Amino acid sequence: MSTKTSLYEKHVQLGAKVVDFHGWEMPIQYSGIIEEHNAVRSKAGLFDLSHMGEIEVSGPQSYEFLNFLLCNNLDRLEYDGRIIYTGMLNEKGGFIDDLLVYRKQRDSFLLVVNASNREEDFSWMQKQAPPFDVRLNDISMKTGLVAVQGPASASIMADILDYPFENLYYYHFIETAFKRIPVIISRTGYTGEDGFELYADWDKLGIIWDALYSAGQKYGLLPIGLGARDTLRLEARYPLHGNDISPDVTPLEAGLGWIVDLNKPDFIGKKVLSSQKKNGVAKKLIGFTMAERGIPRHGYTIFSGDSAVGEVTSGTMSPSLSTGIGMGYVSSCVLEKNENLTVDIHRSRRCLTLHKGPFVSSNIYRKTVKERI
């Protein structure tokens, strides 16, 4: 049986097409993927993300525990209210999950993990915890999460909350209240647009959803399903666990070396990553646009001449660019030769063009500390 979020009935009332997503009944679309996608790029969109997992880590050695568990360095969380993106790796350096870490206090953290990995993540954390004086608490089924994303998101937030949102920096959060409901508000997102994520009690989340939906109408806000969420994140070139990153992929192979601190004394997977840093990686994640008509899809083969040299991990027709875009892993030695690459689409080889960085210019709120998050 699939699990329903506390907002399920609201999705049905709004005409959502609901599908099973990793054991959750989630809206895939409402008015249509392209319309929803364009609303987020130009106006605003409202997302139900209550399927995501939330895990509390606290105790005297929580800082030391997380610095061993995760590949990024928690020293970058210099003060309460900061967030970092990082990876939880296995001994081979592969991704058990990618996640966000919220520093609430020096000895209290909130981890936000992927829905499909929550139970595995929590089990792995329990396995690694015994040497440390820490407490782990999976609060996922008590915590609801919504996000408002797009150029109008700050205006919508200001309409319902008396707070100077120009002072809430990117990858920072506050703990406050809305109509006496405790809420965590972070300036983060998965779309490449300015936006906010709001965490609240599972049973109270509907009040927050209704307020955001109502306030957003004059700005053109639409409810957004998982379909547009995927096209938005791919245009921003954000990786998706299970597609672009997995237990068989390391951060260095995925182009995420910036979330790895090899100067830390030790962390799980460090030995493998240190070797890759020194000797190079066998495969690399590339971004590409289609030089010919065609839509790349997950699992399609990438060729150099007649040789299969890689595979598409994510692909779509970009609503913003009206062309096919994608990511995939390709042999490093092939990339070094700068050979022409093609994608096999319905038994036809279509040429692709390598693309660095996001496919669509990012509109993230940039008032932040001067360092890469």
Image (spheres, helix red, strand yellow):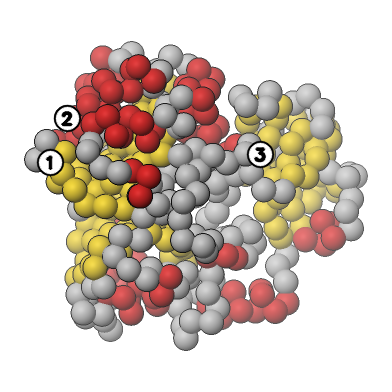
- Between disc 3 and disc 2, whose residue precedes? 2
Q: Which residue is mark 2?
A: 207
Callout 2: helix, strand or loop? Answer: helix
The residue positioned 26% from the left and 14% from the top of the image is 13
- Between disc 3 and disc 1, whose residue precedes? 1
Residue 181: mark in rendering: 1
Residue sitting nearer the eye, 306 or 135:
135
Callout 3: helix, strand or loop? Answer: loop
Up/down of 86 relative to 36, above or below: below
Q: Quadrant of residue 345?
A: top right
Left or right: residue 319 versus residue 58 is: right
Q: CA distance from mark 1 to mark 2?
A: 9 Å
The answer to whether residue 122 shows anywhere in this view is no
Callout 1: helix, strand or loop? Answer: strand
Q: CA distance from mark 3 to mark 2?
A: 36 Å
Left or right: residue 97 versus residue 245 is: left
The residue positioned 51% from the left and 62% from the top of the image is 370
Q: Which residue is mark 3?
A: 359
Q: Amino acid at mark 1?
A: Ile
Where in the figure is residue 93, as x and y percent of width and height? 54, 70
Where in the figure is residue 192, as x and y percent of width and height? 52, 40
Left or right: residue 68 versus residue 287 is: left
Q: Amino acid at mark 2?
A: Ile
Residue sitting nearer the eye, 332 or 82:
82
Where in the figure is residue 204, as x and y percent of width and height? 14, 36
Q: Amino acid at mark 3?
A: Phe
Where in the figure is residue 343, as x and y percent of width and height? 78, 37
The residue positioned 38% from the left and 59% from the top of the image is 83
The answer to whether residue 171 shows anywhere in this view is yes
Residues under numbered marks 1 and 2 in contact, where contact means CB atoms less than 8 Å apart:
yes
Q: Residues within 10 Å of mark 1 (few under 14, many from 20)?
A: some
